[in-house]
Each structure stands twice: as C-alpha cells, then as structure tokens.
Amino acid sequence: MKKTLIAALLTVSVGSVFAQDAGHTPHVATVNAADFRAHVLTREELDKLLARPQDLLVIDVRRPDEVSKIGGLPVYLSIQLNDLEKSVAWIPKGRTIITVSNHAKRAGKAADLLAAKGFKVAGAAGVQTYEQEGGKLTKIEPPPRPSTASAAATGSP
C-alpha cells in the first residue's frame, strides 16, 4: 500500500514538473530580484555605459571557460565571484563599475558586495541576456592546445 502511494505521488509530481516546463526555454535563467539588490541593466543602459569606456570598469565574475565559450565584453577585469572580496583592495574606485555574469545572478551578488564596500556600481548585466536582446559580444578563441608530439619535444606534460 505504502509503495503504491509513493509511486502514485511520484508519477503525479513528475507529470506536473513536465507540464510546468512545457513551453519553457531551458537555457534562459530567471533572475530572482530577491537574490540581490543591484539593478539589472538593460541592453540600452549597458550600451550607453559602454560608450564611455574611460569612465567605466567592467568586472566579469564568470570562469574563464565561460568567457571563452559564450563571449564577453571587449575590455574587462576578470575576478571570479569567490575571489572578489579578497580582491577589493586593488580595484580602482574612480570608475563606475558594471558587474557581468551569464544571466546577472552572480553579477548581482558581486554588485551588492562592491556597493557595500563603497564602490560606485551602475548595476549588473548578463551577457547571454544582453546578446539575446541584440547586444554584440566579443568572442575570444582560446589558443590551441599543444599537440602531443610538440609537447614531448619541449618536455611539457
């Protein structure tokens, strides 16, 4: 009896999950405003800020593999979110900061941290959202890995 009830509940739960996901685009993450306080920049707001690079500092909090796979903005400072707090001493305070991640969730947390430390933060941006809204990303091709033969010749692993 207990096994039948559990199996029935699982079937209903799984069915409702699939029904809720019907028509949902899985690659688009939803930014939950409760996760952070920072303003999420629109494409137009981001483009306006990027037009004045001399006043701006873009901090990309994604991993390097995300930047190379997805693309990013042309000039940025790369500091992963977990390393941001210990890096604040060398981040210049004289510029307006935009924090960047894929869909702005990590960027929002980074923006909150920097604002709390006294930095002037314009907001957070998601590069994938920006691109979906018509913004242009810079694609960076990583250098090719050395072949096994050339690695053996140089003594590299």
Image (cartoon, rainbow, N blue to C red):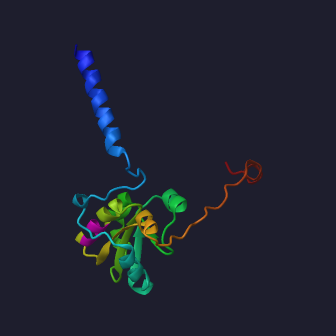
Q: Main secondary structure of the magenta part?
A: helix
Taking the magenta stretch, the answer to whether it contains residue 45 is no
Q: Quadrant of the N terminus?
A: top left
Residue 114 horizontal/vertical position (percent): 29, 70
Residue 78 vertical position relative to residue 56 in the rendered view, above or below: above
Q: Quarter of the image holding residue 100?
A: bottom left
Report if residue 9 is visible in the image.
yes
Q: Going 38% across and 49% down the picture, which residue do you hit? A: 23
Q: Nearer the viewer, residue 98 or 42?
A: 42
Mark yes or no: residue 92 visible. no
Location of residue 81 in the rendering, given as x and y in whole percent from the top left corner: 36, 60
Residue lying at 33% horizontally and 79% vertically, measured from the top left: 93
Query: Nearest the camera: 152 or 144?
Result: 144
Quadrant assignment, res 87: bottom left
Q: Position of residue 50 (x, y in %)?
A: 43, 80
On screen, residue 156 versus residue 87, left or right, reads: right
Instruction: Give the magenta-colored segment's residue range.
Output: 111-115
Specify the farthest residue to the top. Answer: 1
